[in-house]
Image (spheres, rainbow, N blue to C red):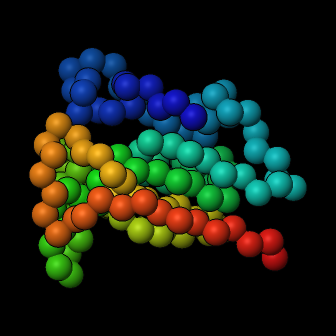
Amino acid sequence: MTVPYSCYKYLFERGENTDIDRNFLVESLGNPDRNQYNILLSHTPFYFEEYEKWGADLSLCGHVHGGIIRLPFVGGLLSPNREFLPKYDLGEYVKNKSTMIVSKGLGGSKVLIRINCKPEVVNIKLKHR
């Protein structure tokens, strides 16, 4: 799924913003097949609740780079969209029957500094139940 740049509110603070909601996902992707396992690959994790409502069983996301600076016992300090203590910064999140995995990734945003936040490649194994 390609997320429009207008969904990144920090880029368009004065302009029109697009929210990702279930209607946007249905228009972009159609309705998920509830008899299949639905995997959604999206750049940003900030819309996890909407991914879950749409019907994603698994969402794979990045964008936050683990919070760029990670503080022990706190987590990621800053997201690329200048948000402190982002809700979804790294790891696995579960809501109802939907799971989202957020990776730190290999790259960086405009600021290429990482503190306590080494780049990573995530290996995910899906098992049939």
Left or right of 97 in this view: 14: left
* Residue 85 in sight from this viewpoint: no
* Residue at point 76%, 44% (across, down): 32
Q: Which of 45 and 27 is in front in this view?
A: 45
* Residue at point 33%, 33% (across, down): 8
Q: Nearer the viewer, residue 74 or 127?
A: 127
Question: Where residue 65 sits: x, y (%)?
Answer: 29, 54
* Residue at point 52%, 30% (across, down): 2
Question: Where residue 66 sits: x, y (%)?
Answer: 29, 60
Q: Is 3 situated above or below 91?
A: above
* Residue at point 61%, 36% (across, down): 25
**What quarter of the picture does the N terminus occupy?**
top right
Q: Which residue lies furthest to the top in this view?
A: 15
Q: Is 93 situated above or below 5?
A: below
**Residue 110's quadrant in the figure?**
top left
Q: Is 13 situated above or below 35?
A: above
Q: Which of 27 and 79 is in front in this view?
A: 79
Question: Where residue 68 sits: x, y (%)?
Answer: 20, 56
**What quarter of the picture does the C terminus occupy?**
bottom right
Label count reads: 0
Left or right of 115 in this view: 92: right
Left or right of 121 in this view: 53: right
* Residue 118 in sight from this viewpoint: yes
Q: Residue furthest right?
A: 35
Question: Where residue 79 sits: x, y (%)?
Answer: 23, 50
Q: Nearer the viewer, residue 70 or 87?
A: 70
